[in-house]
Image (cartoon, coloured by chain):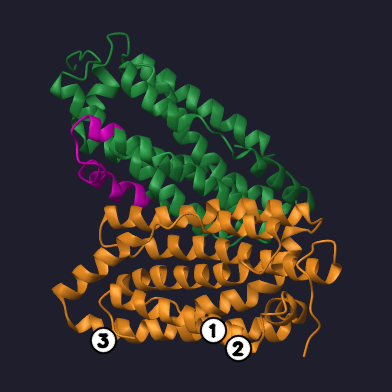
Chain colours: A orange, B green
């Protein structure tokens, strides 16, 4: 049982957790921008390439508010991001797309998983942090992926089975790396998992992961993929 | 001797040349965005990585006005860009940076060469095209490179000789690929080289290249490199 922590930025314990959280979000966005641009190199057409570069650019545009938010907390943004390089790089290394279809599914499924995760926890945070995080969640541009993947499956039914497994792997790897982070960053996980508000007990956490999983399955369905 | 062509978009010959020019600029920017992001993967620190990603993002932001400009000319932007993929990809393949320093010098020298080139020719074009091109030239964000390279040379004088050669190679490869394009895209080169306005004769072209070369040498000097 961990102590309850009020979502108050003057509390050093809570503040340290928020610096961690923003650091993780910031490096996640930088990293997503780089990977999406790399994936754009596999696009079958210039139009597809531009769509993916557009997603990369949206990710990058979200970095600055996070850096600003960290500086407002008197934190060095680069120090705050540093602990999350290894787990986020590992996530990308273990989910390196083998082709264009895997790139597309990862862009859609991965980005939305991350957004769901932050959205769920942001409601329990202080208003200032919540508004910073909300600004990074504002734009959702990956719907073009749905069209492309559905058309791809229609043209070649065989890719559906492979991509369904791929979606599961992304989900699994995201959970694995989240657990690593939770184990290593005690302050962050205490605040997110236990202390932010009294009502956020283990049952609530299970509910949150249940909702995230359900939305993941819905998205896989929209892509025409079984989970 | 080629015929004089007035810079008038209702003239199909001139219009075809402008579609070519915008296609080349557009693909050049997409490609620069991809390469800069790739180069960001070699950055020694997160702060440096962000600087290079910022440059990549500036390049990408310039793509949309070019696509819009092409559509205004009833051209398919992807078809317009297609002929320039091979020479621009070749330029990047022959100037693939071997390390962070080469990435920095290429970002600075290459980007500014391209900008000089467009700036020189844009003055001879119709006002509409000129304003589209001007919008892609508006932002100059690569000055951070100057600081970094100068500091790098101060810390290790040996890199200066190598980077000076590297700058020459980028200039040489840019000229080589420009010549390929000029040879293959007759309408474009006729309009740019001969016909746009009567005064743009061979002597003027030589002057333009003289100015571009001088500015290149000045930039190399700012980096602390001999040409």
Report the magenta residues as a range: B69-90
Specify few, some or many for label 3: CA neighbours under 10 Å numbering under 14, 14-19, or 20 or more.
few
Q: In which quarter of the image is the N terminus of chain A?
A: bottom right
> Residue B56 magenta-drawn?
no
Examine the rendered structure and indicate whether residue B186 appears above or below residue A184. Answer: above
Q: Which chain letter matches label 1?
A: A
Marked residue nearer the N-terminal end (2 or 3): 3
- Residue found at x 37% / y 27%: B132
Q: How far apart are marks 2 and 3 (CA)?
A: 33 Å
Q: Going by the picture, which residue comes out furthest to the top?
A: B199
Q: Can residue B32 be seen in this view?
A: yes
Q: Can residue B156 be seen in this view?
A: no
Specify few, some or many for label 2: CA neighbours under 10 Å numbering under 14, 14-19, or 20 or more.
few
User: Which is nearer the eye, A213 or B191?
Assistant: A213
Q: Pinpoint residue B217: horizontal percent, then vertical percent.
A: 58, 31
Mark 1 = which residue? A207
Mark 3 = which residue? A161
- Residue found at x 56% / y 87%: A206
Rendering quarter of residue A165: bottom left
Q: Which chain letter matches label 3?
A: A
The label on residue B203 is: none
- Residue found at x 60% / y 81%: A178
CB contact under 8 Å: marks 1 and 2: yes
Examine the rendered structure and indicate whether residue B22 appears above or below residue A65. Answer: above
The label on residue A203 is: 2
Specify few, some or many for label 1: CA neighbours under 10 Å numbering under 14, 14-19, or 20 or more.
few
Q: Nearer the viewer, mark 2 or mark 3?
A: 2
Q: Is residue A16 left or right of residue A105?
A: right
Q: Is residue A137 left or right of residue B23?
A: right
- Residue found at x 28% / y 53%: A47
Marked residue nearer the N-terminal end (1 or 3): 3
């Amino acid at each position: 049982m961990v102590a309850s922590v009020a979502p108050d930025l003057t509390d050093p314990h809570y503040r340290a957790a928020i610096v961690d959280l923003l650091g993780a979000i910031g490096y996640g966005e930088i990293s997503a921008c780089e990977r999406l641009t790399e994936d754009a190199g596999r696009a079958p057409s210039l139009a597809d390439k531009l769509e993916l570069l557009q997603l990369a650019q949206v990710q990058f545009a979200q970095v600055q508010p996070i850096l600003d938010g960290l500086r407002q907390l008197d934190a060095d943004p680069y120090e705050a991001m540093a602990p999350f390089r290894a787990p986020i790089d590992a996530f990308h290394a273990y989910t390196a797309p083998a082709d264009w279809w895997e790139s597309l599914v990862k862009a859609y499924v991965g980005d939305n998983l991350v957004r769901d995760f932050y959205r769920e926890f942001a409601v329990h945070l202080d208003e200032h942090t919540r508004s910073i995080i909300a600004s990074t969640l504002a734009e959702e541009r990956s719907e073009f992926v749905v069209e492309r993947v559905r058309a791809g499956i229609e043209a070649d039914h065989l890719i559906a089975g492979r991509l369904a497994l791929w979606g599961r792997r992304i989900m699994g790897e995201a959970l694995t790396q989240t657990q690593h982070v939770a184990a290593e960053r005690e302050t962050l996980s205490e605040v997110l998992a236990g202390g932010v508000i009294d009502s956020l007990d283990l049952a609530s956490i299970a509910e949150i992961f249940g909702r995230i999983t359900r939305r993941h399955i819905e998205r896989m369905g929209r892509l025409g993929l079984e989970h």
